[in-house]
Amino acid sequence: MRPAPRSPWQSHMAEIAAIREETPGVRTYDLVLREPAAREAFRFEPGQFNMLHLPGIGEAALSVSSDPARPAVIGHTVRALGNVTQALARLTPGAEVVLRGPFGTPWPLDALRGRDVAIVAGGVGLASLRAAICRLAADRTDYGRIAILHGAQTPADLLYVDDHAAWRTAGIDVWTIVDRPDDAWRGPTGFVSELLDGLGIAAADMAILCCGPEPMMGAVGERAFALGLAPADLFVSLERNMACAAGICGLCQFGPAFVCKDGPVFRHDRIAPFLGVANL
């Protein structure tokens, strides 16, 4: 007998177990579900998101940035921008929040086994890909070359720098680039799309997983395709305002798709006709 489908409206109380300052204005919140049964049942795939609700304030869609192999601790890396995330930034460990999820389509890691994989992220977009990096590192021998390309405005804005050594030890290349270097910066300066030139895309059986501001993802696509990447081998994660995560409210509609149900991860060639439509 098939189990009853999970209701998208089912929520659980969670406690903030720990808070880590990642970069100025960006923190990672480690959440633990209060109910033992809910904590035991919770599973997610890299690229999925949760709806985090603060009573009396609102709800926000947040990518899960923690290791899917350790689902008892649910990490969200968040920049304080809107009402919900600014209120979240005022909380301390021990505070309670309400969680729904997980929702959405994951990164297609199983379908990419045996291939080269490049993670390309701009700014806090790397948060959506961190769970995928954890999975790729754990299953490293199942893939070819793996590279992380991360761009940020300044060196202080680079996320997860404390993880770089572990990623490199796992056999993953890590490249970083910044728009505005400081006096101590010794790496390249420019945009993350410029790092694609060193990947050898034309000679590789490669797929790219990309998340960041939409102009940045557009630039990554243009450069990758010019270098020989097939449009079907670029996967992007889109961000849209969401209220229900069930495809009912319509706030996240993107052309014929709903980001909460059909995304947030999309194959580029399937949504390319809509990416250039202003204000869609």
Image: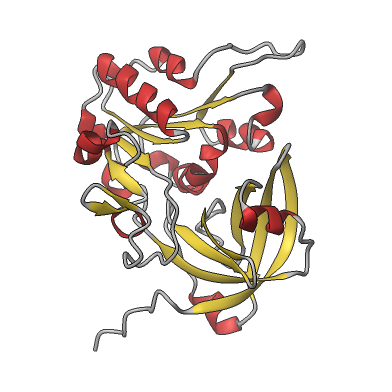
In this picture, residue 15 sits left or right of residue 143:
right
Q: Is residue 105 visible?
A: yes
Could you tell whether 250 is left or right of 47 in the image? Answer: left
Residue at the farthest bottom position = 1
Residue in the foreground of this view, choosing between 141 and 212: 212
How many numbered discs?
0
Give x and y (percent) for residue 254.
Answer: 29, 48
259 lies above or below 94: above
Q: Is the N terminus in the top left, top right, bottom left or bottom right quadrant?
A: bottom left
Report the side of 184 relative to 77 (left or right).
right
Query: Does residue 146 appear in this view?
Result: no
The vertical placement of 104 against 229, above or below, is below
Q: Position of residue 94 (x, y in %)?
A: 78, 69
Residue appearing at x 44%, y 43% in the figure: 136
Q: How is the image coloured?
A: secondary structure
143 vs 12: above or below: above
In this rendering, position of residue 168 left or right of residue 250: right
Q: Nearer the viewer, residue 138 or 249?
A: 249
Quadrant in the picture for residue 200: top left
Residue 233: quadrant of the picture: top left
Residue at the (25%, 84%) spot, across then down: 2
245 versus 110 height, above or below: below
- Estimate the x, y position of residue 60 in percent, counting from the top left: 54, 59
